[in-house]
Amino acid sequence: MAGMRRAESYDDGHTIADMSDVRGAVRPEHRGSGDFSDELQSAEERWMVVLGTLRAALSIGMVYIVGFGIAIAVMVALWT
């Protein structure tokens, strides 16, 4: 490859990321399941969170069911 040149490595003095304040690996805060009680004040808010989570999970599940159904229908049509 005659047209390709190897990149020269040199220090142009620009700071990409200031790492002077990093002391070690930063561990994320671990919150237990009981720590969320102050964020969801009422029973209605908790119920809405549960229903929203269930709706999201069912929506994703339906996408997979429809996708597999179409794939099976195409396979049956091709092999019969």
Image (tube, rainbow, N blue to C red):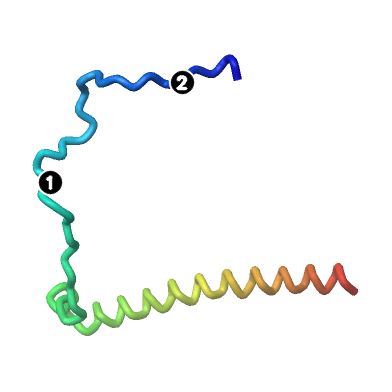
In percent of width and height, residue 49 lies at 30, 76
Q: Position of residue 17 (x, y in %)?
A: 21, 35
Return the residue nearer the eye: 19 or 34: 19
Question: Any mark on residue 22, and which?
Answer: 1
Point out the image quarter for the N terminus.
top right
Q: Is residue 12 above or below residue 58?
A: above
Dot 2 crowding, Cα within 10 Å, few <14, some 14–19, many 20+: few
Is 8 situated left or right of 29 in this image? right
Choose the circle earlier in sequence order: 1 or 2. 2
Within the image, what quadrant is residue 29 found in?
A: bottom left
Residue at numbered disc 2 = 6
Q: Secondary structure at mark 2?
A: loop
Q: Is residue 16 above or below residue 35?
A: above
The reply, left or right, for residue 15 in relation to residue 65 is left
> Residue placed at 10% from the left, 39% from the top?
20
x and y percent of residue 41 in the render? 15, 78
Position above or below: 42 against 14: below
Using residue 55 as the reference point, say whether residue 26 is left or right of it.
left
Look at the picture and state if 2 lies above or below 37: above
Alpha carbon separation for disc pair 1 and 2: 33 Å
Amino acid at the residue labelled 1: Val
Toward the top, the furthest residue is 3
Which residue appears at 69% of the width and 74% of the height? 69
Q: Nearer the viewer, mark 1 or mark 2?
A: 2
